[in-house]
Image (tube, rainbow, N blue to C red):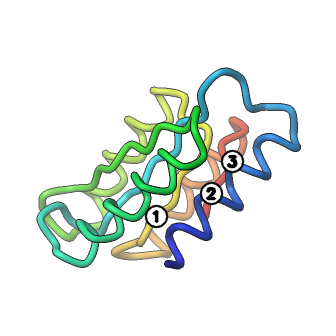
Amino acid sequence: MKIKASLILTVAALALSGSALAEVKIALVAKSLGNGFFEAANVGAQEAAKELGDVKVIYTGPTTTTAEAQIEVLNGLIAQGVDAIAISANDPDAVVPVLKKAMQRGIKVV
């Protein structure tokens, strides 16, 4: 439920900021792939995206629960030019620099 609410709020913020074009790309970054909790969150996010329309949820994450692996994933998402990143950080302090880089490029971070 929190993921769905975050997704809706993020899309609304993007639309109001004028940065929303044809399709809003929101990355959902899990602590690790294959985790049932995050798989369920992905299902909810995909349903919310379908309801909203013109929203693409990119569900991703590392295969290991390390900050280094998440940083690799985040750098890839920045390179793809996603509009927003929702992350459950393995090590919040370690991912701050890369998330700041994302925000400097206009990517919303939740």
Q: Which residue is mark 2?
A: 109
| Position of residue 19 in the picture relative to residue 94 (left or right) | right
- Whole-percent x, y for residue 37 in the image: 25, 78
Q: CA distance from mark 2 to mark 3?
A: 7 Å
Instruction: Return the disc, 2 or 3, that comes first in the chain's sequence.
Output: 3
Q: Earlier in the sequence, mark 3 or mark 1?
A: 1
109 relative to 51 in the view: left or right? right
Residue 81: x %, y % from top left: 54, 28
Q: Is residue 81 above or below residue 62?
A: above
Labels 3 and 1 touching (C-beta < 8 A): no
What mark, if any, has residue 87 been given in the picture? Answer: 1
The quadrant of the picture occupied by the C terminus is: bottom right
Mark 3 surroundings within 10 Å by alpha-carbon count, few (fewer than 14), some (14 through 19), many (20 or more): some
Mark 2–mark 3 CB contact (< 8 Å)? yes
Of callouts 1 and 2, the N-terminal one: 1
User: Where, by quadrant of the figure, is residue 89 drawn?
Assistant: bottom left
Q: Are marks 1 and 2 in contact (CB under 8 Å)?
A: yes
Which amino acid type is marked by label 1? Answer: Ile
Q: Nearer the viewer, residue 78 or 34?
A: 34
